[in-house]
Image (cartoon, rainbow, N blue to C red):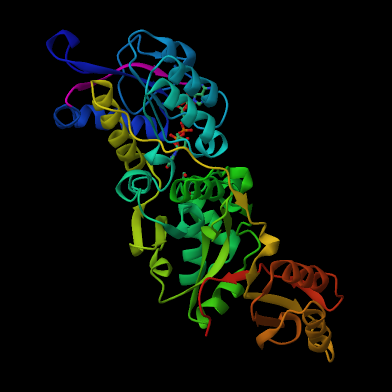
Amino acid sequence: MTAPREHRRAVRVGLLGAGTVGQALLRLLVEEAVALERRAGVALEVTRVAVRDPGRRRGVGLPPGVVSADPASVVHAPDVDVVVELMGGVHPALELVMAALGEGKPVVTANKELVAAHGPELFAAAQAANVDLLFEAAVGGAIPLVRPLRESLAGEHFTRVIGIVNGTTNYILTRMSEAGLGFEAALLEAQQLGYAEREPSADLDGHDAAAKAAILASLAFGVEVRGSDVAREGIRRLDAADVAYARRLGQEVRLLAIAERVAPGPPPVVSVRVHPALVPRSHPLASVRDVNNAVFLEGAAVGELMLYGRGAGGDPTAAAVLGDLIDAAHNHGGGRPGRLAPHQPVRLQPLAERRVAIYVGLEVQDQAGVLASVAAVFGRHGVSIRSMEQIGLGEGARLAFLTHEAGEQDVAATLAELAALDAVNRVGAPLRALGPVG
Ligand code: NAP
Ligand code: HSE
């Protein structure tokens, strides 16, 4: 792909995966070869590429003999100095990355699922081998988040991190809000535009955002949080009426990934959660539209800080991978691997222990006594109603409730009992308030 190695120093790259991100990376490596060599101090030469189907036509040309279907052979190849993992999924990516680190080869990955599931083991292996394990692209695509948290602001005492970290759901919510689309119509549009997968549950059910929330929490607070630790609600239960009502309240609905310090410890207590929320239109996160991502940081010294940009897509993600690759190549050629502060154990606050003000919309039968029976359920669980409005009549009657702050457990019990009432046809998704409502 590049000039013969005998004319200049080169770091030899083994690439695992040449899909959306891998192909964009290969293209950038060719197009930007001269600038990259200047910045890395060495040439970057792709010597091996592993894919599932070597026979498939790709958008980039690769010399014969470079591509194989055996990722382990790429990791172990003597002509590979740095491994770039862009396959996705936990297995076999975990075994391959561990093997590379075990051989003293630096690794660059964009795999949030892998880092969120096995970060502590991977960081320990990289530390033991004294090599880089870099994953800037795993959260927020092109937005620099990992390096600022790990290096530029390593001394900051962050108190809360709030992210819009899933572009697909943000697109769907934007279209529901601005075009009045229903959930299914907005999802279909996102699929037609190539944002949502045909099987979209990783995005819609909040798994993707939960993995990113775990990584952000680990970096911001220096603690061990895994994707499976994150309390998670997705956006499937939202409907157009909920989103329209939120707008009338001066709020936008966003799927938020929130990591918050609750108590200093030891061990520190941290809350990490993903759920749809009401975001006041005056909050900077309310202006994050379409597939864009943003992370809003609150810290003792920095105050408030927001990082914003393209959170996904081949080119933006590959740009972040390339930045890591330059660092890894530079360090491999005699620099020092990036700092990996050990993460301390943490106590995760169960969602049930939190207090929250919510909005919830109920589809009800429009009859005498229904409001009284619904209000009685809130009262029985100690959830104080702040405001209520009936929207629509007869078949389309809907009650929109805003509550004062109440325990999550009490809110959950209220919603469960409401769903069982004969007069309630449907309980909408609860929307937790991020800031003041009304
Ligand atoms: P993708 O388009 O599905 O590409 C995956 C690549 O890995 C394909 O080339 C596939 O081979 C290869 N592969 C998968 N399993 C393999 C195996 N067992 N052995 C050999 N090759 C294998 O995925 P992507 O969108 O590029 O994403 C790559 C990584 O970047 C993921 O971790 C993803 O979460 C992360 N990421 C992606 C984005 C984005 O916008 N796409 C944004 C941020 C982070 P074939 O081509 O032959 O099928
Ligand atoms: N599917 C993700 C999103 C991109 O919609 O943001 C990869 O993390």
| Near-viewer residue (313 or 155) | 155
Residue 205, how many percent across, how many down? 62, 52
Q: In this view, which residue lies farthest toward the right?
A: 422
Name the side, left or right, on which 331 lies relative to 257. left
What is the magenta range? 41-51
Residue 240, how many percent across, how many down? 58, 71
Tell me which corner region of the image, top left, top right, bottom left or bottom right, holds residue 298: bottom left
In the rendered image of this protein, does residue 235 appear above or below residue 335? below
Q: In this view, which residue lies farthest toward the bottom?
A: 368
How many labels sit on residues? 0
Query: Is 118 covered by the magenta stretch?
Result: no
Q: Which quadrant: the N terminus?
A: top left
Name the side, left or right, on which 392 lies relative to 79. right
Residue at position x 39%, y 61% in the image: 299
Residue 173 visible:
yes
| Near-viewer residue (159 or 93) | 159
| Near-viewer residue (162 or 124) | 124
Residue 32, how many percent across, how many down? 19, 32
Residue 199 visible:
no
| Near-viewer residue (326 or 56) | 326
Q: What is the magenta segment's predominant secondary structure? A: strand
Residue 212, how many percent across, how many down? 50, 47
Residue at position x 69%, y 67% in the image: 408
